[in-house]
Image (cartoon, rainbow, N blue to C red):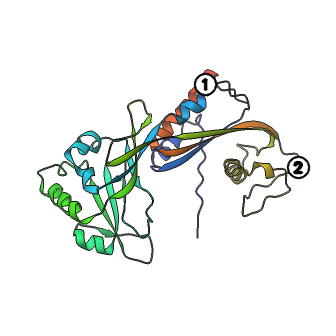
Amino acid sequence: KSHTFKVSSNFQNPKSNHEAIVLGHHFNRRLGFIFPTSQMRGADLSEALATSSFTHTKVFLHELLSPEFLAVYGTASTLTAVSCNSPIDGGNTACILPSGELFLAVDKDTYQQLGLPAKRCKFPIRGSRWLITLNLKSPKFVPGHQQYERVLWCLKSRVSPIEMLFVFSSETGADVSMEVGQHTQLKTSTSSEVYEATPCPLFGKIGDVDDCYDWIGAVHTNLSSYFQAPQLSDFASNFHYTPGMIEGDFTATSLSGFFSSSGVLNRFNVVKEAVRSGALAWA
């Protein structure tokens, strides 16, 4: 059974926990912003939101444990990485969180070959996969220490290279690419579309939260042309058009790439500042 998790937040609410929620969501491939205006006076806003890069690489896991890599990124709190083009329920996968933890999800054969401490994965329910956790920031995980040397020796000869996406947040909060493995630097792509006289839900009205989320989803999947229909197919969206619903103008901006949680928060702050300064018209 699938579940959809929805979180609402208001920047003006002193109890708002939007920052903690954003920083707790580490792997972000697509972002969407909807501005309630068709007049984007701050013409450079979309460019400011999209200005970032990330890295696609094929790397041996032991390269992530090299003294050079650990010296630059191992102690940083803004490094995020995740496997790509590998099934999470079958192949060997890995990820690095800003906390400095390196997680390896491996099949039974790899687990037995490595001989490293591991716990059985909760996913998939059927099957045999094992989760290995390494703390790159541990004072014991340094060259010359027994734990470090054992892990390095195990990974050097027993794990094939894997494809990964890396992103590192600079001191300014911008996401930047890295040089690791056989890497390619990629840029974030962006697209914007202006909508005029389009049916909109009443944001903030109690009881309409589901409609708001379904409407946002329909906009970012280009289904807004069906908003005038009596009812969308439940397969496409649960948003229901109600006669007399308000119509408004808005601009939808979508970003695609790989974004760190701090990079997402930085973009939120860019939008907040644009509204506060009046650079962005706010209906």
Q: Is residue 202 above or below residue 130?
A: above
Tell me the tag on residue 276: 1
Q: Residues within 10 Å of mark 1 (few under 14, many from 20)?
A: few
The residue positioned 45% from the left and 48% from the top of the image is: 24
Q: Amino acid at mark 1?
A: Arg
Instruction: Residue 139: give x, y in percent of width and height.
Output: 19, 48
Kind of residue sitting beneath label 2:
Pro
- Residue 92 locus on image (x, y percent): 36, 65
Q: Secondary structure at mark 2?
A: loop
Where is residue 235, by image quadrant?
bottom right
* Residue in the foreground of this view, choosing between 172 and 153: 153
Quick one: 268 or 31, which is closer to the camera?
31
Q: Furthest residue to the right?
A: 243
Image quarter of the C terminus: top right
The first of marks 2 and 1 along the sequence is: 2
Residue drawn at point x = 63 percent, y = 25 percent = 42
Q: Percent x, y for residue 56?
A: 41, 48
Which dot marks residue 243?
A: 2
Does residue 27 appear left or right of residue 120 in this picture? right
Lateral position of residue 125 relative to residue 239, left or right:
left
Residue 39's disc number: none
Is residue 99 among the parts visible in the rendering? Answer: no
Mark 2 near mark 1, Cβ–Cβ under 8 Å? no
Q: How far apart in space, not on screen, are marks 2 and 1 (Cα)?
A: 34 Å
Quick one: quadrant of the N terminus? bottom right
